[in-house]
Image (cartoon, helix red, strand yellow):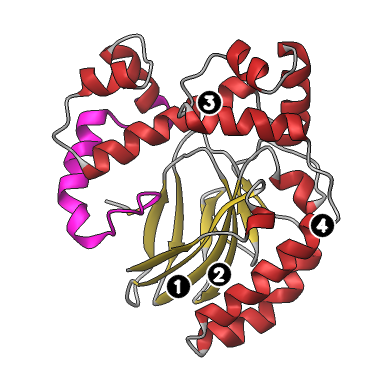
Amino acid sequence: MHHQEFPPPEALQDTIKCFWYNSRDVGELQSGFEVVPDGYAEIIFHFGSGCSISYNGGLQPLPSPFMIGLLNQPVVFYTQNRLEILAIRCFPWTVFDLLGLQPGKDGVHIFEHPMARLQPMLNKFIQAGKIDEALVEVKQYFLNARSGVAMDSMLFKAGVAMRQANGAMPVSQVAAAAHATVRTLERNFKQSSGHTVKDVSGLMRFEQVRNHLWLYPDTNLAGVAHELGYTDQPHLSREFKRYSGTTPAAFARKAKKEKPMVSNDFVAFTSRG
């Protein structure tokens, strides 16, 4: 598997965390890979053999692009042969405004959108191995989209505070950082993202634990719990299992086993064991 991340232009830094490219060859047999929750929404363009999700006992092919919103549990996708992904990692409180869509809480969003017109051109670039050229087109599309949208400065300030605190900041302090009342912040945040400040903060904090365990599977959980503002280690363990479906110890064992096969800086996708 190959993975690269690319920073956004300055004009997009209030809406987009990064752009990324990922490629994998899984062979002729259908293979599953798991997407673990984090604090971002991902717009996914995919190329090659296609990508499917389990639905009503069968596999439902996914269009390109589709979106992975905020997840509250892991989701398994399926592919075979070669799959390449070009994706946009967005802040969840900006992505729906950026795309002109109504916010929703669905984990996987299938929608019709003008940016789907990029697919044929991106496919040509990806097939030719011209990742940089594909990125230029995607970045320009989102620069144009961003210029036509007035982003809420209150949500931007709130997002900065939440990210700096890794999700460990109480809602009242997030509101103070955004120069807003708790009620106003919560209303605007939910209107833009479909989720509460507490929802997103919990995912941000889980993401920090997940990343730490992936990189340092022998880490002391009590120390991580204290550092990230959990009440205690059992509190961390409960929250971790809520979002990942597994215990921190089981995830650490998986990290030890899989890390040689997966880039250290990319923990969202893991193989389905």
* Residue type highlighted by circle 3: Ser
Per the image, the residue denoted by label 3 is 201
Of tags 1 and 4, the one toward the viewer is: 4
Residue 164: x and y, percent? 49, 31
- Residue positioned 64% across, 21% down in the render: 177
Which residue is tagged 2?
Answer: 46
Label 4 crowd (10 A; few <14 / some 14-19 / many >=20): few
Q: Nearer the viewer, residue 128 or 5?
A: 5
Give residue 227's quadrant in the image: top left
Residue neighbourhood size for the residue with mark 2, other residues' Cα within 10 Å, grouped as few (<14), some (14–19), many (≥20): many
The CA span between labels 1 and 2 is: 7 Å
| Residue 153 horizontal side relative to residue 245, left or right | right
| Vertical order, 167 against 252 (above or below) | above
Position in image of residue 152 (x %, y %):
78, 36
Stretch of the chain drawn in magenta: 241-269
- Sequence-wise first label, 3 or 2: 2
Closer to us: 265 or 74 = 265
Q: Nearer the viewer, residue 156 or 230?
A: 156
The answer to whether marks 3 and 1 mark residues whose Cβ atoms lie closer than 8 Å is no
- Please give the name of the residue rendered at 47% of the width and 86% of the height, measured from the top-left corner: 129
Mark 4 or 3, nearer chain start: 4
Where does label 4 land, which residue?
A: 147
Q: Which one is earlier in the sequence, the residue at label 3 or at label 1? A: 1
Residue type at numbered disc 4: Ser
Q: Closer to the camera: disc 4 or disc 2?
A: 4
Q: Are the residues at dot 1 and dot 2 in contact (C-beta closer than 8 Å)?
A: yes
Q: Secondary structure at mark 3?
A: helix
Q: Is residue 76 above or below residue 216?
A: below
Mark sitting on residue 83:
1
